[in-house]
Amino acid sequence: MKLNIFLSIVLACFLVVIAGCAPQKPELLPCKPEVTQIGVTTPEGAWSVIGTQLSIANPNTYPVSVDGLTLKFDTGNGIQGYEEILQKFDIPAQGKISQQVSCNVTFMSIVQDLAMNKGLAGPKAVGAAAPIWKGLGGNKPGMLPQAVWDGIPADPIIYSYETSIYTRANGLQKWVKSAGTWPPAK
């Protein structure tokens, strides 16, 4: 009888040790996009491109597939953008990649936003849009005389943003959201 109890205890200990040695599914650590730059280019003068550079690091010891990435930003003065990257891409194990996200903005889209959302009539909307446009780095709109444009102060632009990323690996998945401002708060 004592032998049976002893063998049962030994067998139970053996099973616990074997179960503990079984391969475990590793946890999927979050890959958090970090905004490294937001810049504006005005190639034609009538529109600007707000380009956002994201750096995405994979802290996992295995490759991760990114199946969804979105960026929302707001300048706090009527300019908002939303971009979604539809193509899937991979981040190597413990690697880092850069991803560019762009959004087009026109001077007239700012004027229209101020007219529709703030109730400003035509000339007042143009006058309110000019400092915003100049702050973005936009070129002088054709309707404004150069002397008027030169006298307009450029509103400083502080972007607030939110990123969302959906990753998959090893049968696991994870949604991660992050937010911040650009330039970063000091």
Image (tube, rainbow, N blue to C red):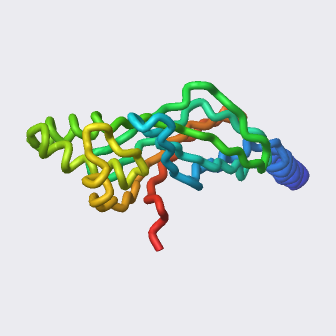
Q: Which quadrant of the structure image shows residue 168? A: top right
Above or below residue 41? Residue 169 is above
> Residue 34, can we see it?
yes
Q: Which quadrant of the structure image shows residue 139? A: top left
Between 178 and 152, the one nearer to me in the picture: 152
The spot of residue 160 in percent (x, y) is: 39, 54
Above or below residue 15? Residue 160 is below
Between 141 and 62, the one nearer to me in the picture: 141
Which residue occupies 79% across, 45% down?
A: 93
Which residue occupies 76% across, 39% down?
A: 63
Q: Is residue 10 left or right of residue 32?
A: right
The spot of residue 142 in percent (x, y) is: 31, 37
Q: Is residue 122 left or right of residue 140?
A: left
> Residue 76, can we see it?
no
Which residue occupies 45% across, 69% down?
A: 185
The spot of residue 68 in percent (x, y) is: 55, 32
Which residue occupies 37% across, 58% down?
A: 157
The spot of residue 163 in percent (x, y) is: 48, 45
Instruction: Name, please, the residue furthest toward the top.
Output: 87
Q: Is residue 129 left or right of residue 13?
A: left
